Amino acid sequence: MAGATYGAGPPLIGITAGLEAARWADWVREAVLLPVAYQRAVERARAVPVLVPPSVRATIPVLIERLDGLIFSGGGDLEPSRYGEEPHEQTGPPQPHRDRFELALLRAAIDADLPFLAIGRGMQALNVVREGSLIQHVPDVVGGHAHEPSPGRFGRHSVQISATSMLGKTLGDHAEVMSGHHQAVRRLGKGLSTVAWADDQIIEAIELQGHRFGIGVQWHPEEADDPRLIEALVAETQG
């Protein structure tokens, strides 16, 4: 059964991370990187964060067996060939190692009915793994930069939420969110429901139908003061 630590102490929440060149002291090396906000948000929800960097596929069954839940974190753009498109001039450089691993991990989490929260890039990966497609540069569609006010910074905007959705039952029918993305869902993937929208009708959250807890949000709850969404994930892992 997935989630082997049920009933045996705080749940283990895996958080996907990237591989990037990083500098510390006198070193410049490839490193596993994840904003510390994810760790702190999981710890505030009284769970144990477990860093999950891209790895070989053989590790995936072990992760699914031993973790109680997963957070698919934000990061760079998915390779457009994975949803049948050529790269837009604004699409970031490919990260094939991360794409391969996280899409396979998502499929395994879905098959195992393991609770997961997909954030930013993670939500886009969820849509792609369900055969959906992405808007590669949101300003081309809506004009302006409300979803990413400036590179490397988050902005605030409102989202409307379906009150009957799992997300709506956690947050209500409206939320002010921290956002920083230039891509978004275009064609919705199979078995997914749209459950939140921005004022410009960009899809801001999706849910996997029939899954125990499979939510994707385009915003970054780990950066905000509202702990309810990550607390809801942790609560679900505890049954």
Image: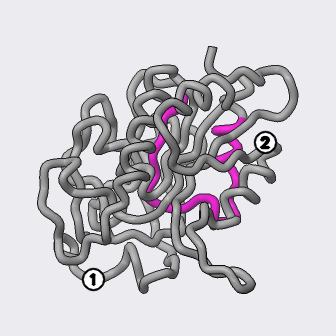
The residue type indicated by label 2 comes to Ala
Compared with 102, 58 (above or below) is above
* Residue 1 pos. (x, y %): 63, 13
Nearest the viewer among 114 and 139 is 114
At label 1, the amino acid type is Gly
Magenta-drawn stretch contains 94: no
Q: Residue furthest right?
A: 9
Q: Is residue 25 above or below residue 160?
A: below
Residue 175 % position (x, y): 53, 59
Q: Does residue 14 sit above or below 111 in this rendering?
A: below
Q: Position of residue 207 (x, y in %)?
A: 41, 37
**Mark 2 sits on what residue?**
47
Instruction: Tell me the SS state at disc 2.
Output: loop
- Residue 60, how many percent across, how many down? 53, 31
Query: How is the model colour-coded?
Result: one colour
Query: Residue 230 magenta-drawn?
Result: yes
Q: Is residue 180 left or right of residue 190?
A: right
Considering the numbered disc 1 on the image, is that residue within a helix, a strand or a loop? loop
Q: Quadrant of the C terminus?
A: top right
Task: Identify the residue position indicated by label 1 in the image.
Answer: 144
Report crowding for label 1: few under 14, some 14 to 19, many 20 or more residues within 10 A (C-alpha): few
Identified at 27% across, 60% down, the residue is: 201
Q: Is residue 209 in view from this perspective?
A: yes
Quarter occupied by residue 67: top right
